[in-house]
Amino acid sequence: MSRAPLQLKHTTRLLDYRLASRVEEIAPLAEAVSRALAQRPDLAFAVNLCLEELITNIIQHGLQGAPDRFIHIRMSRSDEWLEIKLKDDAPPFDPFEQAPEPSLDAEVEERPMGGLGVHLVKNMMDDVRAFYDGSGNLIVLFKTLKR
């Protein structure tokens, strides 16, 4: 996996979206992502699946289901990378370090809850990072634009 640079150069903003912290708000976001990536439905599918997993976790666990908070989603591209940023004001949490590793070898009924969505995101994206900047969590996902 090649590592994306911390700052992409010569980017184009594809999406700037403010999502109310309610699960039913994910569908309109998915439509906006699909429009922004209309030329690449393969990428739109991957991005939407990852966003649904991460946003659901943020709403349920980070924000404890509070319906009056917001998650900011930005999507930009450079020549080589698609960059997706999610920003929330929940307490510090790095899902890529703190979520439990799923037990993929166990039978479905025997698997402990948690971790599968984060595992999916890590495998669908080419680079994932999480930071806490003092005002909230910032998750940054990178997907290469090479086919």
Image (cartoon, grey):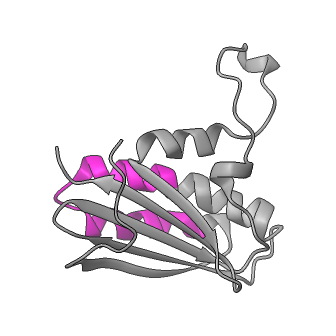
Q: Is 36 a magenta residue? A: yes
Identify the residue at image location x=58%, y=39%.
119
Residue 105's x, y, as percent?
Answer: 66, 14
In this picture, which residue range is highlighted in magenta? Answer: 25-50
Identify the residue at image location x=81%, y=18%.
110
Of residues 86 and 56, which is closer to you in this image?
86
**12 above or below 62?**
below
Identify the residue at image location x=73%, y=46%.
99
Overall secondary structure of the magenta section: helix
Residue 6's x, y, as percent?
Answer: 40, 69
Identify the image quadrant of residue 94: bottom right
Identify the residue at image location x=74%, y=50%.
98
**103 above or below 138?**
above
**119 above or below 15?**
above
Q: Quadrant of the N terminus?
A: top left
Of residues 38 and 15, which is closer to you in this image?
15
Is 82 left, or right, of 67 in this rendering?
A: left
Residue 100's x, y, as percent?
Answer: 75, 40
**20 above or below 26?**
below
Q: Is 127 a magenta residue? A: no
Is 29 left, or right, of 58 in this rendering?
A: left
Of residues 25 and 102, which is closer to you in this image?
102
Residue 26's x, y, as percent?
Answer: 55, 65
Identify the image quadrant of residue 95: bottom right
